[in-house]
Image (cartoon, grey):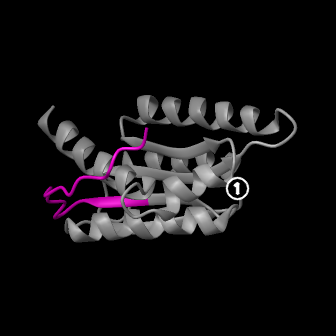
């Protein structure tokens, strides 16, 4: 069951966020990207967007951004990296393989680099699920991803 995205009042002043977004299934990913960006900007954060061809290409860019964040220079440090993509199942197992590879890689990146990597690369059964999760402003997973990133910045700062 989808839950409505609650309004949150978290300040992100001084924080920088990267959003890595797939160009594939652009109708859905673009809607998540707009929502995520708006949520971060509303909180006072700064955003850098990197577009990649498809979901499978997201981890290598996330890894580069996370590694660069260790340099701790003003232009390279990200407080969190948000990854957005939509994979729709087809007649073969290809989507499942892509989804698993992306999930495993993103988990490893955040552990290795100790930078929160927010995983909103959705593996969905059909377009209707994408419509519900990406185009509906009350359930937009881009908003949810940004809220998670904002919360994780607070968690990491408290450690």
Q: Which residue has dot 1 on it? A: 54
Task: Verify whether residue 17 appears in magenta.
Answer: yes
Task: Using the rendered image of the protein, determine whether residue 80 is visible from the camera's viewpoint.
Answer: yes
Q: Is residue 103 magenta?
A: no
What kind of element bears circle 1? loop
Residue at x 68%, y 48% (from the top left corner) = 87
Local crowd at mark 1 within 10 Å, few (<14), some, or many (≥20)?
some
Taking the image as shown, residue 66 lies to the left or right of residue 147, namely: right
Residue closer to the observer: 8 or 150: 8
For the N terminus, the image quarter is top left
Residue 159 horizontal side relative to residue 55, left or right:
left
* Towards the viewer: 147 or 52: 147
Residue drawn at (30%, 61%), measured in percent from left and top?
16
Above or below, 82 relative to 136: above
Residue range of the region highlighted in magenta in the rendering: 1-18
Residue 110 at what x, y percent from top left?
43, 35
Picture quadrant where residue 97 is located: top right
Answer above or below: position of 65 versus 102: below
| Percent x, y of residue 18 | 42, 59
Q: Main secondary structure of the magenta part?
A: loop
Q: Is residue 81 above or below residue 28?
A: above
In screen coordinates, is 93 left or right of 96? right
Tell me the quarter of the image containing the C terminus. Answer: top left
Task: Report the residue that reaches farthest toward the right.
Answer: 91
Total marks in image: 1
């Amino acid at each position: 069951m989808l839950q409505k995205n609650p309004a949150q009042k978290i300040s992100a002043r001084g924080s920088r966020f990267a959003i890595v977004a797939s160009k594939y299934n652009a109708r859905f990913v673009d809607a998540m990207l707009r929502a995520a960006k708006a949520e971060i900007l509303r909180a006072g954060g700064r955003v850098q967007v990197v577009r990649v061809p498809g979901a499978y290409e997201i981890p290598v860019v996330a890894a580069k951004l996370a590694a660069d964040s260790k340099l701790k220079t003003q232009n390279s440090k990200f407080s969190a990296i948000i990854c957005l993509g939509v994979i729709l199942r087809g007649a073969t197992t290809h989507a499942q393989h892509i989804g698993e590879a992306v999930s495993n890689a993103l988990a490893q990146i955040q552990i290795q680099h100790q930078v929160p990597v927010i995983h909103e690369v959705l593996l969905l059964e059909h377009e209707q699920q994408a419509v519900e999760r990406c185009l509906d402003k009350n359930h937009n997973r881009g908003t949810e991803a940004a809220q998670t990133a904002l919360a994780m910045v607070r968690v990491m700062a408290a450690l």
